[in-house]
Amino acid sequence: MTESQWQNCTDPDLMLNFLRDRASDRKLRLFACACRRAIWDLLDEHGQQDVAAAERAADDNANRPGTWLAVQAEATGVASAASTAARARGGDAAARAAWDEQRRTQCALLRDIFQPFRPPRIDPQWLSANGGAAGRLAGEIYEQGAFSRLPELADLLMDADCQEDRLLSHCHSVKGHVRGCWVLDALLGKE
């Protein structure tokens, strides 16, 4: 898969297959959690608590081996759950639309979590400039799940002389950021 194909892909299975030997178990587990968050309203309180616990566990057990096939099955299961719920509300056409929407969402999530082509070069000066403002904010965004603050982080990085266009433009993208976002992970030294 080329970088252009990655950016335009509409099939999360193809993207996951491409990542098979390139993705850390932590990031794969965070992708599975993000898929569940995409159907948050369909989960009961217990299911929502399980997702939050799984996100914490992904970081706490970052080196624990996971199962790549289980993550792929999870993504398919989430799309299926959304499709089934839509069928109950609006029939087969609604089910197909929900399935397609979940698959598009999963592709966007994969692009937010994984940067398999040109890993960004992180200059430690960006994180320490201005009393460490960008480094502190990156940590806060990650810990609090405050992804709407990523444009603020981009501004701090630019003030620290960051000129990595892909990194800055990813921060300025309006939606779709989740725990495991490749920019935050790169800045915080997570894999």
Image (cartoon, rainbow, N blue to C red):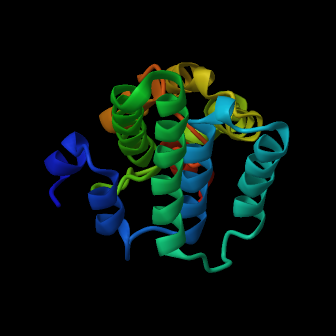
Snapshot quadrant of residue 43? top right
The residue lying at 34 percent from left, 52 percent from top is: 12
The residue lying at 20 percent from left, 40 percent from top is: 8
Q: Is residue 21 above or below residue 187?
A: below
Direction bottom: furthest residue? 65
Is residue 92 at least partly visible in the picture? yes
In this rendering, position of residue 100 left or right of residue 162: left
Is residue 124 at least partly visible in the picture? no
The residue lying at 77 percent from left, 41 percent from top is: 48
Residue 103 image position (x, y, % from top left) = 37, 42
Residue 149 image position (x, y, % from top left) = 61, 22
Q: Could you say which is closer to the camera, residue 102 or residue 32? A: 102
Snapshot quadrant of residue 92? top left
Q: Quadrant of the C terminus?
A: bottom right
Q: Could you say which is closer to the camera, residue 37 or residue 183? A: 37
Residue 152 image position (x, y, % from top left) = 57, 19
Labels in figure, total: 0
Residue 76 image position (x, y, % from top left) = 45, 55
Q: Quadrant of the N terminus?
A: bottom left
Q: Is residue 35 above or below residue 151?
A: below
